Image (cartoon, grey):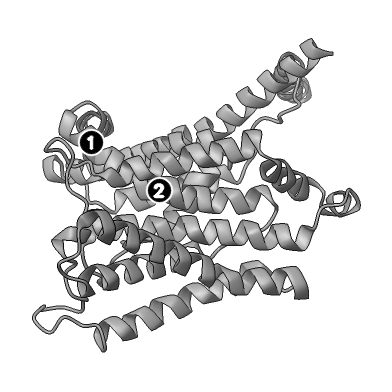
Amino acid sequence: MLKEKTVKNIKSGVAAFCNALIPVLLAFVGGALIIAAARENPFSVYATMLGRALFTPDGFMRVLHVAAPLILTGLAIGVTFKANVFNMGVEGQMLLGGFVAGIIGASMRGVPAAVHIPLCLTAAVFSGALFALVPALLKAYFKVNEMVVTLMLNYAAVEILAFLAEGVFRDPSAGYVSTDMIAGSAAFGRLFGTNLTAFFLIALAAFAVMAVVFKKSRLGYEITAIGKNPEFAEAAGMNVRKKIIAVMLLSGALAGLAGAGWMLGEKYRYTLDFSGSPGLGWDGMLVSLLGSHSVFGILIAAVFYGALKVGVSQAALFTKIPNEIIFVIQALIILFLSVSYLSKNVKFREGAGRIFGKIKGIFKRKKGERTDEQHTL
């Protein structure tokens, strides 16, 4: 029994790995075709991208720095998907967390960093969680589709924060729409003279906590049970409504923390392009999908996608390839991720045999058709 369970787990892990790897490879092939159409060598472009991002000290530290918010937004998406709840509002929750952290960081002066930074992070966490509370309550008590509500709240958050940044909290000395620069006591310092900040360590701590929650805690078990069969979970005595609210609050808190860390470690002020394009929240969805919504998968996917973002910016400096190539590869990854290439329960040998058998049958039929045509002639 134990052996069968071990084999099943291995097969499931291999299938999950292949289902994540194959879309990436296919996306790179599609990107290579576009690069070749632009009369550039795809191999040299990819070598520049990955080499300068992963195999140089400065590049790798930058990758980890960029990966930090992606780890958190990926976890924010993954924790809800595990419970079969779809929080599509991570982008808005992240923006709100970043904005609140920026306002507190700019409005308080003469405060020690040991007090200022935790205060900014705590306020951002609560802001993200409270913003997620509205769709959580609607989902838990009124069965309102959380996907629609959270999607619409993203646009509400963007417009409200743009209004505040253009009006009440605008920095009049800036030549563009932005809030005041945060105080030095609220900013993360660079570690060891690199691009890395303490924000990455905070993201790793959040990753470790989530790993323990899902592997060792009752809450993690209940989230997984609700995701697989909410009716059974309710019959087993779980309060599904409270768990849905808890999951959404946790997701919003992680998103708010991501926004705060990006504010205190990278942007230092809120601007209309604070999250970039398409946005760290949307990038987190790709990271979660690529990591199969598992905690360790999300960590690996975040570092990979961070390397892709950093590598493209480096390739743009040394080749004629524009930064927009990352959007093409991202879109292709999402497209190919929609296909499950291997079932977690597949018997690989039998599956391969069936595939080759079908291919062989097609060739036999075609050969037979050609022979019949020759006899007819």
Judging from the image, what secondary structure is the residue with disc 2 in? helix
Residue 102 higher or lower than 292, as above or below: below
Q: Position of residue 87 (x, y in %)?
A: 59, 61
Q: What percent of the width, then of the height, locates residue 32?
A: 34, 37
Q: Is residue 231 left or right of residue 191?
A: right
Q: Which mark is residue 308?
A: none
Number of other residues with Cα within 10 Å of mark 2, as a class: few under 14, some 14 to 19, many 20 or more: many
Along the line of sight, the residue nearer the viewer: 21 or 267: 267
Crowding near pointer 1: few (<14 within 10 Å), some, many (20+)?
A: many
On the image, numbered disc 2 is attached to which residue? 70
Q: CA distance from mark 2 to mark 1?
A: 15 Å
What's the amino acid at mark 2? Leu
Residue pointed to by mark 1: 61
Q: Residue at x 33, y 57 (%)?
A: 118
Provide residue 191's location: percent of width, then percent of height.
Answer: 18, 39
349 vs 111, left or right, is right
Tell me where residue 81 appears, x and y as whole percent.
63, 51
Residue that sits furthest to the bottom in the current view: 167
Secondary structure type for disc 1: helix
Kindly tell me whether residue 353 is visible in this rendering: no
Q: Residue at x 43, y 45 (%)?
A: 71
Residue 18 visible in the displayed image: yes
Image quarter where the C terminus lies is: top right
Give the amino acid at mark 1: Met
Q: Who is closer to the viewer here, 4 or 268?
A: 268
The reply to whether discs 2 and 1 touch (Cβ–Cβ < 8 Å) is no
The correct choice, above or below, for 113 with respect to 182 in the image is: above
Pick out the residue farthest to the right: 235
Q: Is residue 154 left or right of residue 79?
A: left
Q: Nearer the viewer, residue 240 or 13?
A: 240
Residue 193 in the image: above or below residue 106: above
